[in-house]
Image: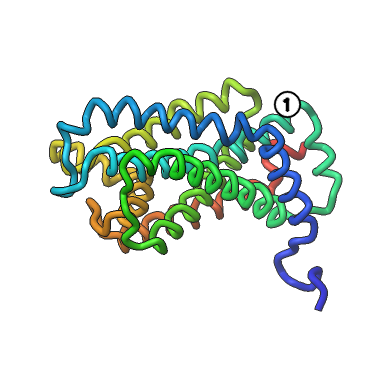
Amino acid sequence: MSASHFPIRLEGARPLFYKEVLRFWKVGFQTVGAPVLTAVLYLLVFGHVLEDHVKVYGTVGYTSFLIPGLVMMSVLQNAFANSSSSLIQSKITGNLVFLLVTPLSHWAWFLAYVGASVIRGLMVGAGVFIATVWFAPPGMANPLWVLAFAILGAGLMGSLGLIAGLWAEKFDQMAAFQNFIVMPMTFLSGVFYSVHSLPAFWQGVSHLNPFFYMIDGFRHGFFGVSDASPWMSLGVVAIAFATVAAFALELLRRGYKIRH
């Protein structure tokens, strides 16, 4: 049976995916190398200042605790940046029209853009881990949890980046979306601290943040302990991914702000 007989048409997804991966890889020093350097600087500053003052989960040193948080933060931020920057640049430069004249389905668009975002997020995350693990190896209690949360988190943020890229009409709007939504939710998710160290009110607020479950579940894969149940975190992240992905697919199906 040919691909055109399937209810979800995926023709063209592979070349578009390849184009999106090539787009960020050609400037890898900026898209992969720079985020790794930023994470290393975070580790050097926060790890040096707080290593002798903060213990997490009873016996885990602060630097070891910080490394998985920085890895996951890098995965999330770069997955979002990949799809959002690609779409907004194509809209502003006018070359999006070359995709619009093709018979690509909304599913093909989604898989290509989000797939490339996942690849970039995982590459940056792996780079951050390799560059920082020598400072204080955090261990690896369950690699499957690490992989599951990394892929789901990157997919979620790639989908959110699609929504932001479709909505924004200029770089200022994209910067506002990232600075006032993505960045605060990332930094308030427990990257640099355990939420158990917060007052009860702010613990409750943190548990309303889906980014917290991505970070916490990912960290569970390294230490085998976490602030919340990893299964609950997995459920929250999976539901959030499904919801955001469905919304992104619907916007693509309607041609929101890309077809006039």
Under mark 1, the amino acid is: Ile
Name the residue nearer the viewer: 231 or 55: 55
**What residue does disc 1 label?**
92
- Give percent across and percent down for residue 83: 62, 40
Name the residue nearer the viewer: 260 or 32: 32
Quadrant occupied by the N terminus: bottom right
Q: How many marks?
A: 1
- Give percent across and percent down for residue 195: 22, 42
Would residue 193 appear left or right of 165 to someone viewing this image?
A: left
Residue at image location 46% in from the left, 52% down from the top: 150
Would residue 125 appear left or right of 94 to someone viewing this image?
A: left
Dot 1 alpha-carbon crowd within 10 angstroms: few under 14, some 14 to 19, many 20 or more:
few
Would residue 179 appear left or right of 105 to someone viewing this image?
A: left
Say if 74 sits above or below 220 in the image: above
Residue at image location 15% in from the left, 32% down from the top: 53
Q: Secondary structure at mark 1?
A: helix
